Amino acid sequence: MSGFVPYGRQQIRAEDVEAVVRVLRSDFLTQGPVVPAFEAAIATHCSVAHAVAVNSATSALHIACLALGVGPGDRVWTSPITFVASANCALYCGATVDFVDVAPDTGNLCIEQLEQRLVQAQRGGQLPKVVIPVHLCGRSCDMKAIRALSQRFGFSVIEDASHAIGAHYDDQPVGSCRYSDVTVFSFHPVKIITTAEGGVAVTADPAIAERMARLRSHGITRDPALMTGEPDGPWYYQQIELGFNYRMTEMQAALGLSQMDRLETFIAARHRIARRYDELLAGLPLERPPSDASGSRSALHLYPIRLNPDLDRRRVFETLRSHQIGVNVHYIPVYLQPFYAKHGFRPGHCPSAEAYYLRIISLPMFPDLSDNDQTRVVDILKDAVT
Ligand SMILES: *Cc1c(COP(=O)(O)O)cnc(C)c1O
């Protein structure tokens, strides 16, 4: 009854273990048939034509930026309330990054701020090449509005949906890419499904998919049509650009494929836990995550509460931690990292993001969280805030 309760945790069942062991005993540990099968399952789930599986969402963000032509001299914009990887991908490409402030309740990119900043940037001739909205906690950003701005101002859109496989927006699965060029998912163990490490980039555009698949594997092609000159022989491959080894292994894909069978179960369990938190936390001096907008369904990767501003967040956090509750804070505004301060960012750049950061605590949220543990989390929290 008093073990450590993390904020997020994978669910591994016998069928997951068997799927991985089957691959271990097969002919291919990498570059075999299971990665394409996993990609097909993701593409089918998302109702999108192409999926490129890689070794992390960080890698997926990198090759998505490159496939959209991001390079030195370009600008990429993202949200400050995210994991550092959403911003770092721009720097990998030699581009610069900037941050657009968030909505105070959801922590997602604020559409009004984005529009204002775009109007200013257009005047100064400094429009971004790519904008990366982040679906914080599994809740989709307002993608119709972002797509409208992308058409008006001429930028591409990568959805960082690391938190959001299984989410819906506009009655479509997140990943349909109806309102974006590429969508990226993460399969780190705290996320919705896991492959241990792993990620995928999905797109409706065959040329972008082909480019990402090539960048995942050294920039090498076996398609004679893409080569300079004739192939030396049937063994011939050609490196036509500088790529990486970002491949996913067959074991990882087998785990992911097995996990995809339970995606709906995972999302349903997260919604049940969120409803229970909503009931148990009613009346406390804090704000609960906003409920789903019409046509949308959050994947509920996280359940962040926002403490009333007069409460001491650090004391509440430390009380929970001292009782073995693995609460966390998602996220420190990226530009407040000392690394980004070196790139010229200063406190005050995104006031709503900084205000959001000061109040949030992510409570434990994962499919196997027991009612008993959840009740314990709430009891300790109640004591700490009242
Ligand atoms: C987890 C996460 C990433 C990075 O995912 P990895 O698969 O660990 O590389 C990127 N963006 C966001 C918002 C994340 O939460």
Image (spheres, rainbow, N blue to C red):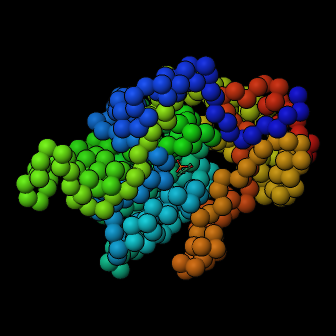
In the image: residue 275, left or right of residue 163: right
Image coordinates of residue 170 in percent, x first then y, are 41, 36
Can you tell which quarter of the image residue 149 is in? bottom left
Residue 178 shows in the view: no
Image coordinates of residue 131 in percent, x first then y, are 40, 60
Q: Nearer the viewer, residue 217 or 364?
A: 217
Q: Residue at position x 33%, y 55% from top? A: 218
Residue 310 shows in the view: yes
In the image: residue 295, left or right of residue 239: right
Image coordinates of residue 225 in percent, x first then y, are 10, 50
Image coordinates of residue 60 in percent, x first then y, are 42, 50
Q: Nearer the viewer, residue 280 or 252?
A: 252
Q: Nearer the viewer, residue 99 or 351?
A: 99
When the figure is inspected, residue 195 is found, relative to residue 372, above or below; the finding is below
Q: Residue at position x 72%, y 41% from top? A: 7
When the figure is inspected, residue 181 is found, relative to residue 342, above or below; the finding is above
Quarter of the rendering occupied by the N terminus: top right
When the figure is inspected, residue 33 is found, relative to residue 55, above or below; the finding is above
Can you tell which quarter of the image residue 46 is in? top left
